[in-house]
Amino acid sequence: MRVDSLTKRFGRGDTALTALDDVSFEVRRGEVVALLGLSGSGKSTLLRHLDGLQAPTSGGGTVLGTDLATAVPAELRALRRRIGFVFQQFHLVGRLTVLENVCTGALGSLRGPRLGLFSYPRAVREAALGRLERVGLADWAFQRADTLSGGQQQRVAVARALMQEPSILLADEPVASLDPESSGQIMRLLKEVAEQGRLTVLCSLHQVDLALSWADRIVGLRHGRVVLDIPARGIDRATVMRLYASVGADAAVGAPGPAAGAG
Ligand SMILES: Nc1ncnc2c1ncn2[C@@H]1O[C@H](COP(=O)(O)OP(=O)(O)OP(=O)(O)O)[C@@H](O)[C@H]1O
């Protein structure tokens, strides 16, 4: 996937806000990239563009051969079917079984609504069980989803995303509400599914140490601009921490000032 001079502005005139400012970077197939930056630096906005959920103001990029700047809605829908998305808040249906939640990941490729586990084709149920085995939760298949811990629910959400057989997995702060041990497990899982499935993973995080441990590369955003794009291995932690320096320290990271009103 390639992001090319992607700019996103919200609003107009004096109140305009440039959330992404001429963002360019490339992600190779199978790579795990951590997206870091202060709150409001544009991470979620970037992920939404890559999933075709938001349209760029200018520039764009190519995701799985789809040109983000020119794609029509049907092309963006087709793109979304090939991309798994994992959210901070899991978005499981608590009263449904774990297995049925995973089955819902196949809805994009099925016709019509589904009600109940047995409304899914047998092949889908078997595939869902396989994905649950993959994330270590096969024994929980018939439990209600809301009886699982946060870390387990996030693993179910990863299994559900894998039902799409995605080529890319986007994760927006997938460990933000988890304890350190569960966070490490989720990041290890993302790394493993990337390696085994030649899956590209782009994951926004607030935990620098997790990024350094599990990502292949770190892309750092500040005020909507890419100010860091480096391999995670062997990187000096202080270099990454400069992303989080106070606004007055912009010169130290070579970053632009706040982009509010720049539009
Ligand atoms: N739909 C929108 N309309 C107006 N402004 C928006 C919209 N979406 C995002 N923004 C603004 O764009 C900027 C970037 O927001 P974004 O959510 O991408 O940041 P983030 O890095 O993901 O933050 P966090 O780490 O807190 O999730 C913020 O200033 C935000 O208020």
Image (cartoon, rainbow, N blue to C red):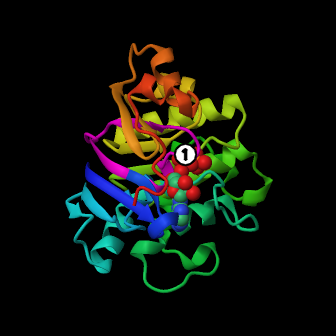
Which quarter of the rendering shows the C terminus? bottom left
Q: Is residue 39 magenta?
A: yes
Above or below 127: residue 173: above
Q: Nearer the viewer, residue 243 or 81?
A: 243
Q: Residue at x 24, y 56 (%)?
A: 61
* Residue 173 image point, x, y percent: 57, 45
Residue 93 occupies which quadrant of the picture?
Answer: bottom right
In the displayed orientation, state which residue is furthest to the bottom: 112
* Residue 175 image point, x, y percent: 62, 41
Residue 143 visible at all: no
Residue 165 occupies which quadrant of the picture?
Answer: bottom left
Relative placement, left or right, of 204 versus 197 is right
Relative placement, left or right, of 108 versus 207 is left
* Residue 224 image point, x, y percent: 43, 47
* Residue 122 image point, x, y percent: 49, 70
Q: Which residue is mark 1?
A: 133
Segment tinted magenta in the rendering:
21-45
Q: Is residue 166 magenta?
A: no
Residue 31 visible at all: yes
Q: Residue at x 47, y 30 (%)?
A: 250
Above or below 249: residue 159: below
Q: Give the amino acid at mark 1.
A: Glu
For ligand 1, give the image quadrant: bottom right
Q: Secondary structure at mark 1?
A: helix
Question: Does label 1 point to a residue whose CB lies under 8 Å from ligand 1?
Answer: no
